[in-house]
Image (tube, rainbow, N blue to C red):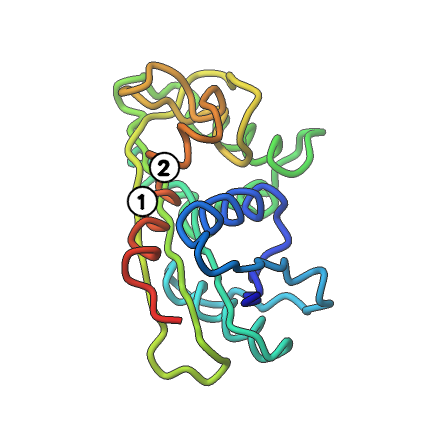
Amino acid sequence: MKKIVLASGNAGKLREFSAMFSRHFNDQPIEIIPQNQLNVHEAEETGLSFVENAILKARNASRQTGLPALADDSGIEVDALNGAPGIYSARYAQRCGYQGTEQGDAANNAMLLQALTGIASEQRNARFQCVLVYLRHADDPTPQVFQGSWEGRIVLQPDGNEGFGYDPLFYVDSEQCTAAALTKEQKNRISHRGVAMNKLTENIRF
């Protein structure tokens, strides 16, 4: 069985990637191992773009484990906020000095709603971005990069119990609900990560 280290310890991402690899590569079993199970020290995300940060994370995980690495850098861009939170999506509340009692995803969601106070629904256009990077080894000179985006808008209050991150705030017009109200199968089919993953499965060179 081929082993690939996922440069993340996020349980939601692990489930999505494992499901997608199982579906697309059932003829060659692949085990996706989250980096926290291999005691990988997280990379410092000093890049100024999703691509740069994904490469940094993949090289870091591959170098510490000796395994091929898959890294994801993703986030949400809101037009009314000039593309913020962007690459800082995962630590948006902390970066903005959020003073509420919520933690983690809930704090980020609350911070985003606060930042959009007074902005009308029709001006809350947003998109999720996902960049996947696959490295065959730590010194791979040609990282394989796959990008996907997902258009939507930010609702006035969270809705839905599935997904993670900003999913409860991200309304998908084609489905008439938020990303957090979609089943895992629906989300994997149309999401930014699903689009990027489809490109990966069609073009990846192991």
> Looking at the image, is 9 positioned above or below residue 7?
above
Residue 68 spot, x, y in % from top left: 51, 73
Q: Mark 1 is on which residue type?
A: Val
Where residue 40 sits, quadrant-wise, is bottom right
Quadrant (top left/top right/bottom left/bottom right) for the N terminus: bottom right
> Looking at the image, is 105 positioned above or below residue 161?
below
> Looking at the image, is 131 positioned above or below residue 145?
above
Residue that badge 2 annotates? 191
- Residue 195 is labelled as 1
Secondary structure beneath dot 2 equals loop
Where residue 48 sits, quadrant-wise, is bottom left
Tell me whether the residue at label 2 lies in contact with that at label 1, contact meaning CB atoms closer than 8 angstroms.
yes
Between 5 and 61, which is closer to the camera in this rendering?
Answer: 5
Residues at marks 2 and 1, CA–CA distance in whole angstroms: 6 Å
Q: Mark 2 is on which residue type?
A: Ser
- Residue 135 is labelled as none
Where residue 155 sits, quadrant-wise, is top left
